[in-house]
């Protein structure tokens, strides 16, 4: 199968063109057609010679994803289910906020991290997405916005869809370089957030990239016993190792880090856990923000339910009283298989039943 040309950074495209006997300036023309004019066929690139068009058509495609399902929420959130060339399914979500349009992208087909509450890991990892398949999720959402005719654009990206982004590190980095490049989509690095469940070696690598991209860590528990129970990755990278890597990131980048904390009823939502979390983050509270997330129930994980509002309030107030910056995430898309991975899982079950 041919890969999507979206997977090439500008430098990679330039090198590939020169290696194949094309002129260097073609790269800028092609990027203009791809990301500014946003054509979907090579033949629509009117100022590109036929030899170059044939060369690209021989080796690459522009569109490798097919829209299988589109769900639209009452609040405007849209969840796309895309089918890839090999038949695998992935999810992408468009969320609209007062500050712009944010897209949540997927980086893997399935997930091997195995968090016990998460819909993404219901189906084990089949493969990594290549950079082009990740970029194309953004482009497909942008094409959707283009149909509105209001010059709306994707302004923010969160890499929090199905899969562990740092387990697909090289493709992730190429994706970030493509969407951030000023010659293309020019999405500001500070408008991009990458989320990890805690692969500590990659947190250190990411700190050394010298990017302005935001980092979020899925913590979900303030002690090893509880975190290991709900997140098996904690066996390989316990909280002590995770904190060391986070300290390195903060010292290297001096950038604020977000801690994601899903509140599970009567599991990790007691005042006791809030106190432990405040203690854990005390020394880094000036560069930390805790994002408290009401749990979206998953049918296959019925041992977990959403925390009661009164417990969410107590947890939040405890953190604030201890000087920890925090907030409760505004929910979107709760009426359209809100938990990441739910739509994909339901579609696969439906296809198997046919």
Image: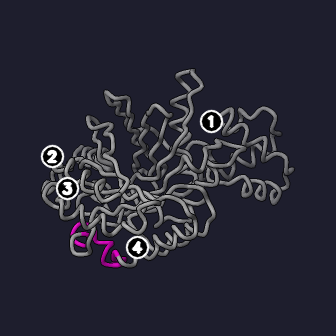
- Residue at 42% x, 50% y is 87
In magenta stretch: residue 228: yes
Query: Which residue in the structure is indicated by mark 3?
Result: 264
Q: Which mark is residue 243?
A: 4
Indicate the secondary structure of the residue bearing disc 4.
helix
Front one among 216 and 27: 216
Give me the disc on residue 310.
Answer: 2
| Residue at 35% across, 66% down | 112
Q: Earlier in the sequence, mark 1 or mark 2?
A: 1
Magenta includes 252? no
Mark 1 and mark 4: Cα distance apart in space? 45 Å
Q: Position of residue 38 (x, y in %)?
A: 65, 34
**CA gap, disc 2 and disc 3:** 13 Å
Query: On residue 40, which mark appears?
Result: 1
**Figure colour scheme:** one colour
Distance between mark 3 and mark 1 Cα atoms: 44 Å
- N-terminal-most mark, 1 or 4: 1
Residue placed most toward the observer, 90 or 64? 90
The magenta span reads 227-239
C-alpha gap between disc 4 and disc 2: 30 Å
User: Counting residues from the N terminus, which is met first, the one under dot 4 or under dot 2?
Assistant: 4
> For mark 2, does the 10 Å Cα neighbourhood hold few (<14), some (14 to 19), or many (20 or more) residues?
few
Is there any visible trace of residue 336 in the rendered image?
yes
Relative to 102, does residue 133 appear above or below in the rendering?
below
Give the quarter of the figure containing the N terminus.
bottom right
Instruction: Report if the CB atoms under discs 2 and 3 are less than 8 Å apart.
Output: no
Figure quadrant of the C terminus: top left
Give the alpha-carbon distance from disc 1 to disc 2, as whole Å.
50 Å
Q: Secondary structure at mark 1?
A: loop
Splitting the image into 4 quarters, where does residue 220 fall? bottom left
Q: Nearer the viewer, mark 1 or mark 2?
A: 2
Q: Count neighbours of disc 1 (C-alpha within 10 A) and say few if under 14, some if 14 to 19, many if 20 or more.
A: some
């Amino acid at each position: 199968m041919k890969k999507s040309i979206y997977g090439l950074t500008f430098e990679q495209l330039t090198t590939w063109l020169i290696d194949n006997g094309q002129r260097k300036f073609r790269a800028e023309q092609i990027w203009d057609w791809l990301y500014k004019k946003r054509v979907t066929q090579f033949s629509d690139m009117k100022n590109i010679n036929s030899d170059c068009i044939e060369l690209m058509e021989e080796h690459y495609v522009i569109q490798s994803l097919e829209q299988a399902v589109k769900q639209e929420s009452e609040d405007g959130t849209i969840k796309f289910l895309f089918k890839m060339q090999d038949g695998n399914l992935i999810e992408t979500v468009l969320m609209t906020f007062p500050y712009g349009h944010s897209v949540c992208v997927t980086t893997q087909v399935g997930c091997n991290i195995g968090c016990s509450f998460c819909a993404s890991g219901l189906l084990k990892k089949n493969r990594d997405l290549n950079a082009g398949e990740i970029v194309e999720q953004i482009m497909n959402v942008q094409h959707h916005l283009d149909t509105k005719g209001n010059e709306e654009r994707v302004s923010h990206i969160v890499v929090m869809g199905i899969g562990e982004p740092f387990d697909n590190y090289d493709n992730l980095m190429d994706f970030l370089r493509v969407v951030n490049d000023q010659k293309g989509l020019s999405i500001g690095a500070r408008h991009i957030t990458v989320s990890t469940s805690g692969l500590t070696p990659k947190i250190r690598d990411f700190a050394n990239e010298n990017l302005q991209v935001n980092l979020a860590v899925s913590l979900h528990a303030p002690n090893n016993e509880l975190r290991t129970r709900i997140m098996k990755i904690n066996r390989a990278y316990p909280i002590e190792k995770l904190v060391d890597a986070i300290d390195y990131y903060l010292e290297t980048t001096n950038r604020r880090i977000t801690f994601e904390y899903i509140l599970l009823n009567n599991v990790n939502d007691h005042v006791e856990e809030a106190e432990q979390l405040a203690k854990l983050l005390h020394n880094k509270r000036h560069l930390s923000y805790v994002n408290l997330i009401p749990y979206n129930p998953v049918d296959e994980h019925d041992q977990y339910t959403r925390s009661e509002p009164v417990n969410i309030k107590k947890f939040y107030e405890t953190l604030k009283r201890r000087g920890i910056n925090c907030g409760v995430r505004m929910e979107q898309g709760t009426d359209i298989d809100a938990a990441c991975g739910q739509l994909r899982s339901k579609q696969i079950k439906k296809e198997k039943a046919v």
